[in-house]
Image (spheres, helix red, strand yellow):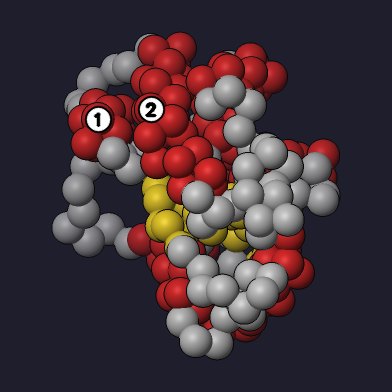
């Protein structure tokens, strides 16, 4: 049973754009679903649910478009509330039901993204942003948060110019990515038991191996 009193396991991936969150979350989910995964106590197969924020539900997709791709100014508090609305709906309709079934939820971004991006990047009160997300999700916290740490300069090189969909957050200057990274590392230092911090410049296979080893330690708690 996880820290939320539910029989499943909630794993989130965090980090700046280009850090490899989507790649590593997919690799972990594929491994957990495959024959090489340790499985739960008793050897039963695992149910694995991949999720993401924002945009993990039909409502979330609309909110994602409003927040990330709408041109023009969005007030920081309005932005934080939109993300919280998406999180409330997603937690209630996707994450909690899966955890209640005893599934492993592997999710790309969660409340730590809001604390880092809105609390530090937007310079809102980080504690208020965190409390808003905890209220929205009825206190739902991950059992493990994997932070893929990447220097913003390396992130820019990885992302490149290219033909990319307009993302309003990527236009932020004045040290925005640096503040976000610093906040992520501060959050990880404050909760070392929940966070696994990894250098995102390491080889993808090495990262996947370290992540699997840490997750394997948690699997025996499923359903306990």
Viewer can see residue 77? yes
Residue 213: x, y in percent? 71, 76
Q: Earlier in the sequence, mark 2 or mark 1?
A: 1
Comparing 89 with 149, the one in front is 89
Alpha carbon distance from label 2 to label 1: 8 Å
* Position of 36 relative to 191 (above/below): below
Dot 2, crowdedness within 10 Å: few (<14), some or many (≥20)? some
Q: Is residue 10 found left or right of 221 in the rendered image?
A: left
Relative horizontal placement of residue 169, taking residue 211 as reference (left or right): left
Q: Residue at x 23, y 21 (%)?
A: 72
Residues 16 and 12: in front is 12
- Where 151 falls versus 215 (above or below)? above
In this view, which residue lies farthest toward the bottom? 36
The residue tagged 2 is 89
Q: Picture coordinates of residue 153 (x, y %)?
A: 52, 57
Q: Position of residue 128 (x, y in %)?
A: 63, 15
Q: Which residue is mark 1?
A: 59
Please tell me in which quadrant of the rendered image residue 5 appears.
top right
172 or 4, nearer to the observer:
4
Quarter placement of the C terminus: bottom right
Query: Residue 212 in the image: x percent, y percent?
Result: 64, 75
Please tell me in which quadrant of the rendered image residue 78 appears.
top left
Tell me the residue at 69%/71% (across/down). Answer: 41
Around disc 1, counting alpha carbons within 10 Å, would you say few (fewer than 14), some (14 to 19), or many (20 or more)? some
Q: Which mark is residue 172?
A: none
State left or right for residue 190 relative to residue 209.
right
Q: Residue at x 56, y 74 (%)?
A: 44
Asked if residue 144 can be seen in this view, the reply is no
Pointers 2 and 1 in contact (C-beta within 8 Å) = yes
């Amino acid at each position: 049973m996880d820290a939320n009193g539910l029989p499943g396991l909630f794993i989130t991936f965090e980090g700046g754009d280009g850090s490899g969150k989507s790649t590593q979350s997919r690799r972990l989910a594929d491994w957990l679903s495959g024959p090489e995964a340790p499985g739960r106590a008793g050897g039963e197969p695992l149910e694995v649910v991949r999720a993401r924020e924002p945009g993990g539900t039909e409502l979330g997709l609309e909110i994602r478009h409003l927040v990330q791709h709408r041109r023009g100014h969005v007030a920081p508090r309005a932005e934080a509330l939109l993300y919280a609305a998406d999180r409330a709906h997603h937690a209630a309709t996707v994450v909690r039901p899966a955890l209640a079934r005893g599934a492993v939820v592997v999710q790309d971004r969660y409340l730590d993204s809001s604390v880092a991006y809105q609390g530090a990047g937007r310079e809102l009160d980080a504690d208020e942003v965190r409390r808003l997300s905890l209220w929205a999700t009825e206190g739902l916290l991950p059992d493990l948060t994997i932070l893929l740490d990447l220097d913003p300069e390396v992130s820019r090189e990885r992302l490149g110019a290219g033909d990319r969909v307009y993302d309003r957050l990527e236009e932020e200057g004045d040290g925005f990515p640096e503040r976000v990274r610093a906040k992520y590392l501060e959050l990880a230092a404050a909760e070392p038991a929940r966070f696994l911090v990894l250098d995102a410049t390491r080889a993808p296979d090495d990262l996947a191996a370290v992540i699997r080893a840490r997750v394997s330690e948690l699997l025996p708690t499923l359903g306990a």
